Image: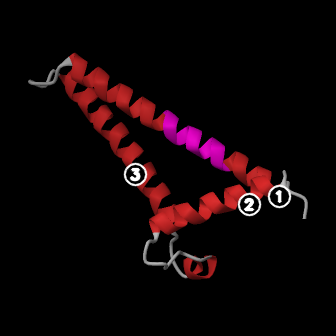
């Protein structure tokens, strides 16, 4: 990887960090060590949203199976697809994080 490409990536990271923390209080590893980092909170929120979508789809599916009034098949199918898409997206994010971690760990010092 060339120095030019690394400098561009670092510049992009700095600009994103400045957008996330406009007051200049960017989270540092030392600050993040004392508590949960912003990234960890974001991941927890994402996993929670996927879990909620799956729970909602499951509850709606069970209600349809029991014959609950007002629960229609298209609504059940839509919620099941939303849950499926959100789970696949979360899985893809996890796969990319694992790949990035492996790439970093395999970098020569």
For discs 3 and 2, the disc positioned in front in the rendered view: 2
* Position in image of residue 11 (x %, y %): 64, 62
Task: Work out which residue is located at the far right of the displayed protein and give it.
Answer: 108
Q: Which mark is residue 48?
A: 3
Q: Between disc 3 and disc 1, whose residue precedes?
A: 1
Q: CA distance from mark 3 to mark 2?
A: 35 Å
Q: In this rendering, is residue 93 above or below 64? A: below
Task: Work out which residue is located at the far top of the displayed protein and give it.
Answer: 73
| Magenta-colored span | 88-97
Q: How many other residues sit within 10 Å of disc 2, few (<14), some (14-19) or many (≥20)?
A: few
Q: Which mark is residue 54?
A: none
Q: 35 left or right of 102? A: left
List the residue tagged with mark 1: 3
Q: In this rendering, is residue 104 above or below 31? A: above
- Residue, x 68% and y 56% (percent of image)? 9
Secondary element under disc 1, as helix, strand or loop, is helix
Secondary element under disc 2, as helix, strand or loop, is helix
Q: How many other residues sit within 10 Å of disc 1, few (<14), some (14-19) or many (≥20)?
A: few
* Position in image of residue 75 (x %, y %): 22, 23
Q: Is residue 87 magenta?
A: no
List the residue tagged with mark 2: 7
Q: Are marks 2 and 1 in contact (CB under 8 Å)?
A: yes
Q: In this rendering, is residue 3 above or below 99? A: below
């Amino acid at each position: 990887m060339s120095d030019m490409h690394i400098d561009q990536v670092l510049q992009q990271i700095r600009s994103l960090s400045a957008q996330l923390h406009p007051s200049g209080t960017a989270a540092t590893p030392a600050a993040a060590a004392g508590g949960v980092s912003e990234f960890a909170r974001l991941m927890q929120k994402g996993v929670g949203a996927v879990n909620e979508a799956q729970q909602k789809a499951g509850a709606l599916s069970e209600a349809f199976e029991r014959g609950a009034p007002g629960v229609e098949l298209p609504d059940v199918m839509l919620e099941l697809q939303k849950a499926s898409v959100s789970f696949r997206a979360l899985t893809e994010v996890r796969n990319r994080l694992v790949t990035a971690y492996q790439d970093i760990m395999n970098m020569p010092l």
